[in-house]
C-alpha cells in the first residue's frame, strides 16, 4: 500500500490563515507540515488559523502534537485556532487528549 504523505494548502485573507491539510499525518509528515504552518503564522500573523482536516485520511499522535503545537505558536502571534471537519477517528483522538478544553482551540464538525 502506498501511503499518501500529508501536504497543506495555505491561503491568507482578511486576517484569517486557512490551512487545508491532505493525506496522512504521521511522524514522517508532521515535521514539514509544522515548519510550513509556523512559517506562515509568523509571516502573516493572522487573528485566526483555520485548519481543515476534511481530507486527512489518518492521523496519529504526531498529528495531535502538530495541532497542539500550532495552538501555542498561534498564541505567540495573537491568533486562535479552529480545527474543522475532523473525521470520526480524528475527533476521537482530539477528544481523548482533552483538546476541546484549550481556550485557544475550537473544534468544529
Image (spheres, helix red, strand yellow):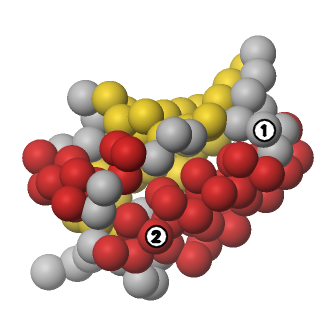
Q: Indicate the position of residue 81 as horizontal and vertical percent values.
A: 56, 39
Q: Say whether residue 90 is left or right of residue 44.
A: left
| Number of residues whose C-alpha sits closer than 10 Å to that of mark 1, classed few (under 14), some (14–19) or many (20 or more) | some
Q: Indicate the position of residue 65 as horizontal and vertical percent values.
A: 46, 70
Question: Which disc number belongs to residue 2?
Answer: none
From the image, which quarter does the C terminus lie in? Answer: top left
User: Regarding mark 1 in the picture, which secondary structure is present there?
Assistant: loop
Q: Say whether residue 20 is left or right of residue 74.
A: left
Q: Residue furthest right?
A: 43
The residue indicated by pointer 2 is 65
Q: Indicate the position of residue 47 as horizontal and vertical percent values.
A: 73, 28
Residue 62 visible: yes
Q: Which residue shows up at 29% across the image and 62% down it?
A: 97
> Residue 24 sits in which quadrant?
bottom left
Residue situated in front as seen by the camera: 46 or 101? 101
Q: Which residue shows up at 70% across the image and 56% down it?
A: 73
From the image, which quarter does the N terminus lie in? Answer: bottom left
User: Regarding mark 2 in the picture, which secondary structure is present there?
Assistant: helix
Q: Which residue shows up at 77% across the image and 32% down it?
A: 46
| Number of residues whose C-alpha sits closer than 10 Å to that of mark 2, classed few (under 14), some (14–19) or many (20 or more) | some
The residue indicated by pointer 1 is 78
Q: Indicate the position of residue 62 as horizontal and vertical percent values.
A: 40, 76
Residue situated in front as seen by the camera: 50 or 32? 50
Does the CB distance between marks 2 and 1 fall below 8 Å?
no
Q: Which residue shows up at 44% across the image and 84% down it?
A: 28
**CA separation, marks 2 and 1?**
20 Å
> Residue 3 sits in which quadrant?
bottom left
Amino acid at each position: 500500500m502506498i501511503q499518501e504523505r500529508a501536504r497543506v494548502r495555505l491561503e491568507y485573507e482578511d486576517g484569517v490563515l486557512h490551512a487545508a491539510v491532505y493525506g496522512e499525518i504521521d511522524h514522517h509528515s508532521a515535521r514539514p507540515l509544522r515548519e510550513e504552518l509556523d512559517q506562515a503564522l509568523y509571516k502573516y500573523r493572522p487573528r485566526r488559523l483555520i485548519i481543515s482536516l476534511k481530507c486527512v485520511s489518518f492521523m496519529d499522535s504526531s498529528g495531535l502534537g502538530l495541532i497542539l503545537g500550532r495552538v501555542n505558536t498561534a498564541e505567540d502571534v495573537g491568533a486562535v485556532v479552529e480545527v474543522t471537519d475532523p473525521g470520526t477517528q480524528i475527533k476521537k483522538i482530539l477528544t481523548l487528549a482533552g483538546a476541546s478544553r484549550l481556550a485557544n482551540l475550537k473544534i468544529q464538525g
